[in-house]
Image (cartoon, rainbow, N blue to C red):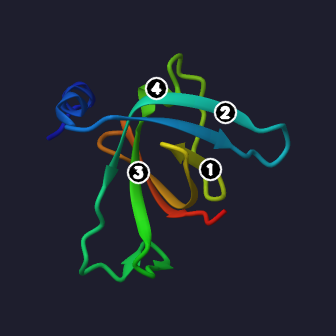
């Protein structure tokens, strides 16, 4: 069984870590922007046609965000659909999200926004 400590240590072997600026859009208060320094992109398996309840179109991207960077003091921040992630000046809109790997990594299914 994968422990939380082991899952966090495995994040260290991710080859290409990216800086991501995440804008959380809560329902009631003003948006919050957080900078994360160890995000990474994960390719989708080409045979997938669904992700949860969403039908995939083929232009989606998986972005992984470590929970300890999103919530450094355990403040309960959550990434939700409609939130925005900017990596290398490319803006992505979150379509669906799951908290994975023993609650250590947010897996965000995103689509690039066209400007």
The residue drawn where x is 39% and y is 58% is 62
Compared to residue 92, the image places residue 103 above or below, namely above
Q: Would residue 83 be found to the left or right of residue 4 on screen?
A: right
Compared to residue 99, the image places residue 12 above or below, namely above
Q: How crowded is the residue under tag 1: few (<14 C-alpha within 10 Å), some, or many (20+)?
A: many
Residue 84 percent coordinates (x, y): 62, 50
Residue 81 percent coordinates (x, y): 61, 58
The residue drawn where x is 60% and y is 63% is 113
Counting residues from the start of the chain, the first of labels 4 and 3 encountered is 3
Q: Residue furthest top?
A: 73
Q: State the SS at label 4.
A: helix
Counting residues from the start of the chain, the first of labels 4 and 2 encountered is 2
Q: Which residue is mark 3?
A: 63
Q: State the SS at label 3.
A: strand
Counting residues from the start of the chain, the first of labels 1 and 2 encountered is 2
Per the rendering, the mark at residue 58 is none
C-alpha distance separating marks 4 and 2: 12 Å
Q: Which residue is mark 2?
A: 33
Counting residues from the start of the chain, the first of labels 3 and 1 encountered is 3
Q: Are marks 4 and 2 in contact (CB under 8 Å)?
A: no
Q: Quadrant of the N terminus?
A: top left
Q: State the SS at label 1.
A: strand
Q: Would residue 27 be found to the left or right of residue 13 on screen?
A: right
Q: State the SS at label 2.
A: strand
Counting residues from the start of the chain, the first of labels 1 and 4 encountered is 4
Q: Which residue is mark 1?
A: 84
Nearest the viewer among 84 and 49 is 84
C-alpha distance separating marks 3 and 1: 11 Å
Q: Which residue is mark 4?
A: 69
Q: Quadrant of the C terminus?
A: bottom right
């Amino acid at each position: 069984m994968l422990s939380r400590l082991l899952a966090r240590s495995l994040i260290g072997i991710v080859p290409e870590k990216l800086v991501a600026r995440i804008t959380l859009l809560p329902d009631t208060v003003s948006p919050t922007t957080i900078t994360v320094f160890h995000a990474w992109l994960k390719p989708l398996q080409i045979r997938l046609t669904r992700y949860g309840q969403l039908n995939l179109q083929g232009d989606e991207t998986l972005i992984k965000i470590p929970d300890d960077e999103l919530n450094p003091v355990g403040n309960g921040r959550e990434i939700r659909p409609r939130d925005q992630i900017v990596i290398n000046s490319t803006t992505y809109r979150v379509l669906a999200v799951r908290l994975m790997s023993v609650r250590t990594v947010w897996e965000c299914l995103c689509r690039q926004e066209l400007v």
